[in-house]
Image: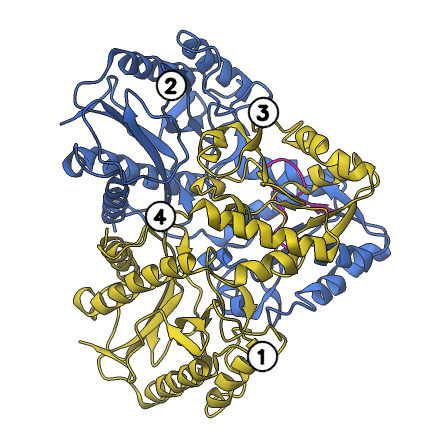
Chain colours: A yellow, B blue
Amino acid sequence: MRPDAPSRGFETAEFAARTEKAQSLMAATGLDGILLLSEPDVRYFSGFHTLFWQSPTRPWFLFLPASGKPIAVIPEIGAALMRQTWVEDIRTWSAPNPANDGISLLTELLSPLAERGATLGIMKGHETGWRMPLGDWERLVSQLPGLQFGDATALVQGLRMVKSEAEVAKLRHICGIGSATFERVPEFVSAGMPLEEVFRAYRREALLQGADDVPYLVGGADQGGYEDVISPPSRRPLQQGDILMLDTGSTWDGYFCDFDRNWAIGTPDDLSRRAYDTLWRATEAGFAAARPGNSCSGLFQAMQGVIAEMDDQGGDIGRLGHGLGMQLTEQPSHAAFDQTELKEGMVLTLEPSLGYGQGRIMVHEENIVIRADGAEMLTKRAAPELPVLG
Amino acid sequence: MRPDAPSRGFETAEFAARTEKAQSLMAATGLDGILLLSEPDVRYFSGFHTLFWQSPTRPWFLFLPASGKPIAVIPEIGAALMRQTWVEDIRTWSAPNPANDGISLLTELLSPLAERGATLGIMKGHETGWRMPLGDWERLVSQLPGLQFGDATALVQGLRMVKSEAEVAKLRHICGIGSATFERVPEFVSAGMPLEEVFRAYRREALLQGADDVPYLVGGADQGGYEDVISPPSRRPLQQGDILMLDTGSTWDGYFCDFDRNWAIGTPDDLSRRAYDTLWRATEAGFAAARPGNSCSGLFQAMQGVIAEMDDQGGDIGRLGHGLGMQLTEQPSHAAFDQTELKEGMVLTLEPSLGYGQGRIMVHEENIVIRADGAEMLTKRAAPELPVLG
């Protein structure tokens, strides 16, 4: 462990503050409770943190009442871990049980709301999914006549977008680990190395630098630029004239960094150097525009103004950055459609991209936190000129 | 890369065979198409393989028509990678677009089915989720009056349960990597090492042994046995008298192993030794019962019969093993409720567990494939007596 690591987990006061803020907003928006199903939403209000969510077999539920602590309705296998959190009311069943995976417990919990025609908040908006069988949900709803539903997406995502200082400390820590790993790349990557082995070496180094895990690692390498930014690595060896990109989502205590770096293998071509310079300056423009009171749309325009020197499409990534936290990508989006106001405490990526040459694409990415007087860089800034690996 | 690694990806013929089998079953069960949303389901029929699914921002859709190749409806950022698969009809939009994230494209695709009152298969049964915003789904359905819906869960899960030899080769490869990593544990784990560092060292070794990634690693260590099997690691150093368990879900080319190993730190207590012996014999009983024609329920009973010598509850895990493949856990479940018949080509875990002592739990796990004349072990069998780390 790095000596500068912050402490793991959060104080109980942080979960209480999150819950009270949610309850205050629930009262203002007419929600009498919120049912949460997803790993980050459940973790945000409870502190329940486990990789076991990777098994899709069992659903997990956390109910935020109008007042008081959250109530957990979970498989018995999670009871011991949930008892270590601040949650006190923990209701469990022996799961999996296809005939009744928590449905009776939820019916009992929600029936009082249904009987008085109350409104249950659910997460059904942009960037959400529904982590339980749709058939079970339909069955549950049919057993709760009178229950009204409201969309809690904006409420929950709005809270999660603004990070506490304890969250920022975790994000800064993993960004530091990612930066230190990228700095070591010239020591373990060189021409002739298959991209698959580059990925493996990067993962091992990130763990050595203190990452808990490297759940996300993508990249590309090809002559005069890469063509794709989401593929798994090939066995193709790095060659002179390649542009290499690695994009990492490494984690520490359940929080992600998400940024990338580019390198030339040997002397780079002029067009790739120009693309790099354009994106480096686009990031600078985004950083300068990242202040409270500006919007995601404004941040997008600031970067797009520079990118347009080379490419008026800005690649086909769909946006030029996003929120960052317990998930690799979170709301908001730096795109023309997103009018979200930038607020102190938001942790964001700046991710300008452009298309160039014969179907080539280049992406840059840094991670920042919005402060009262502007942005603070959490990653160690990329070099201003395309670095060369021997 | 290990010299014995199978090739990555699959032949086009394999995707064609999977699709034809599905279409034959669709015809027999009255489904005129199936809409798939989840990463493993989309990958199973298309070969589209990327870690980018970790970003929850964008939905991805694959439509299986009654005949012909699947049709992809995906964000533009995935088009280059999808073009490398056997899928030819690829329809994209610039995502994210909260106002219209693929909904117009899906409406256009599905309208002909709606107009003739056809039945669309969707995945709404046990062990499924819904990987798109529920609000968008409701909007889509409202735009397709006349469309009927059928549950395609049994059809798709039934196909995915039985692995091809190419899939078994990948699973055997990652099980071999996991086994080799566990064999090295005595070289890098000893008393005094914090559990967090044990996890980090295990991950680095698994990568060195050839794993692409270690998405899942849980475990526990405590005096006379561990209390919990899904927690992240603590900073507590291993002590004489601890029982240590590590449970890994490592991957190679998108396929998981899922098994664990137990060790004593110094001389083990008698009760832990007895629990180990009981579970080792329960695994033997499960292995002997794992033959075509037996059922998951029968497999469960075979293991439970041995476990009952010490514990008539079998821990609180809810089942004694499950299917394994592109996901850490897949159907079926070794539990009294699951009457699924064992078939040649099924890859399964045997995972007996028991509660003992003062709130202690122990789990054993191996991975097998069902063959015509019985089971084949994919993992290197655990030692018959609880191994001791110095």
Residue at left offset 47%, top offset 44%: A47
Residue at left offset 36%, top offset 69%: A378
Amino acid type indicated by mark 2: Thr
- SS at circle 4: loop
Amino acid type indicated by mark 3: Thr
- SS at circle 3: loop
- The chain carrying label 3 is B
Answer yes or no: do the residues labelled 2 and 4 have beta carbons within 8 Å? no
Amino acid type indicated by mark 1: Ser
Q: Which residue is mark 2?
A: B283
Depth check, front residue: A146 or B257: A146
- The chain carrying label 1 is A
Which is more N-terminal, label 4 or label 1? Answer: 4
Depth check, front residue: A230 or B162: A230
- Residue lying at the far top in this picture: please name it: B309
| Magenta stretch bounds | B121-132
- Spatial separation of the CA atoms under disc 2 and disc 1: 58 Å
- SS at circle 1: helix
Q: Residues within 10 Å of mark 1 (few under 14, many from 20)?
A: many
Q: Which residue is mark 4?
A: A8
Q: Quadrant of residue A220?
A: bottom left
Q: Residues within 10 Å of mark 4 (few under 14, many from 20)?
A: few
* Magenta stretch: helix, strand or loop mostly: loop
Residues flagged by tags 1 and 4 on a common chain = yes
* Left or right of B355, for residue B267: left
Percent x, y of residue B9: 42, 53
Residues flagged by tags 3 and 2 on a common chain = yes
Q: Which residue is mark 1?
A: A297
Which numbered disc, 2 or 4, marks the residue closer to the eye? 4
